[in-house]
């Protein structure tokens, strides 16, 4: 395998440089490289220029025969397609052989775990400690503005415009979205900035959230803050025990709250920063529930 990888070393380095330049997370880089190397191994020394659609389809069929799940196969396919897109962009290869291959079907009947509004409100009430204001602000941005953990970490002070009540968020694929911030949340952000810890390093001066060590907040620290909050939440509301609660569930709760209050799916898509509206459609369980409630209010007047 090592010898085969040496054959594709130039292309792999180009792909990795592209991922780094476009701001892909370290986890995504590792995942894509892992999937790509497995695909390249399956080529048995075939040069990149000669790879065609059949090679990609054969590899995906092999994964299916090994009983890998559709999610894993789709991730592998995405890595291969992006790899050839990069090579095509830099004129290494004229075509992308993975471009028009349909993805594996993934079951769409899963309902995301979310918190009802009363539990979501309780989340900010149960945070305490020395860095209470900072931690409440982090949780509020996830639960009431739909930010991902990675977006919390990348947030800079200049991304918040209190005069316009607007927050710029750098999401997946280095794409910006702009979220109108309600007054209560805007006031909270301004209050937090007044007490923000002074960073120790010059490179962290722009960071919105600073850790107790004077550095830009890490993903692990944000997850620890939310985990501690969920522990307190379950202690206060034992009926929530058994739910798989995580930082991302605050984002689910935000989307659910929007739909229950009349927001259309396209608006929710833009506020969440989903590239494809099909990703947002996992929240349509809320619409179904609303339909049921609406129909239950209908009473018939019959002559018998």
Image (cartoon, grey):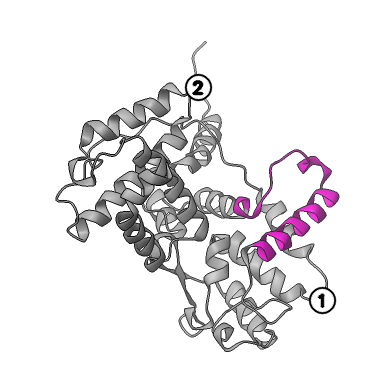
Image position, residue 65 (x, y; %): 42, 21
Instruction: Work out whether residue 274 or residue 218 is closer to the camera in this orientation and state it.
Output: 218
Relative height, residue 181 to residue 233 (above, below)? below
The residue positioned 37% from the left and 31% from the top of the image is 104
| In the rendered image, the vertical position of residue 161 relative to residue 252, given as above or below | below
Q: Locate residue 185, reporting x and y percent.
A: 60, 72
Q: Which residue is mark 2?
A: 301
Q: Residue at x 72, y 79 (%)?
A: 213
Q: Nearer the viewer, mark 1 or mark 2?
A: 1
Examine the rendered structure and indicate whether residue 153 appears above or below residue 231: below
Q: Magenta span covers which residues?
A: 220-249
Of residues 303 and 86, the one drawn nearer to the viewer in this rendering: 86
Image coordinates of residue 95 in percent, x first then y, are 16, 47
In the picture, the disc for residue 130 is 1
| Mark 1 or mark 2, earlier in chain | 1
Location of residue 168 in the rendering, given as x and y in whole percent from the top left corner? 45, 73
Q: SS at mark 1?
A: loop
């Amino acid at each position: 395998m090592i010898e085969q990888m040496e054959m594709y070393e130039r292309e792999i380095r180009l792909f990795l440089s592209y991922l780094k330049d476009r701001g892909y997370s370290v986890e995504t880089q590792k995942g894509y490289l892992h999937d790509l190397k497995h695909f390249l191994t399956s080529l048995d020394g075939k040069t990149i220029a000669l790879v065609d659609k059949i090679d990609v389809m054969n590899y995906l069929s092999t994964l299916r025969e090994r009983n890998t799940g559709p999610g894993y196969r789709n991730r592998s396919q995405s890595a291969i397609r992006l790899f050839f897109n990069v090579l095509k962009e830099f004129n290494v290869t004229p075509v992308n052989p993975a471009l028009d291959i349909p993805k594996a079907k993934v079951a769409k009947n899963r309902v995301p775990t979310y918190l009802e509004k009363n539990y979501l409100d309780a989340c900010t009430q149960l945070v305490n400690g020395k860095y209470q204001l900072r931690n409440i602000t982090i949780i509020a941005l996830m639960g009431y503005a739909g930010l991902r953990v990675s977006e919390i970490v990348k947030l800079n002070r200049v991304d918040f415009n209190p005069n316009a009540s607007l927050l710029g968020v750098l999401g997946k694929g280095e794409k910006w979205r702009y979220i109108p911030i309600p007054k209560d949340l805007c006031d909270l952000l301004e209050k937090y900035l007044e007490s923000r810890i002074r960073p120790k390093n010059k490179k962290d001066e722009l960071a919105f959230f600073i850790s107790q060590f004077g550095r830009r907040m890490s993903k692990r620290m944000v997850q620890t803050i939310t985990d501690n909050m969920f522990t307190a939440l379950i202690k206060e509301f034992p009926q929530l025990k058994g739910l798989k609660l995580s930082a991302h569930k605050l984002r689910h709760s935000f989307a659910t709250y929007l739909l229950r209050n009349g927001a259309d799916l396209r608006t929710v898509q833009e506020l969440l920063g989903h590239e494809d509206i099909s990703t947002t459609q996992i929240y349509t369980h809320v619409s179904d529930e609303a339909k049921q409630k609406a129909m239950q209010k209908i009473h018939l007047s019959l002559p018998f």
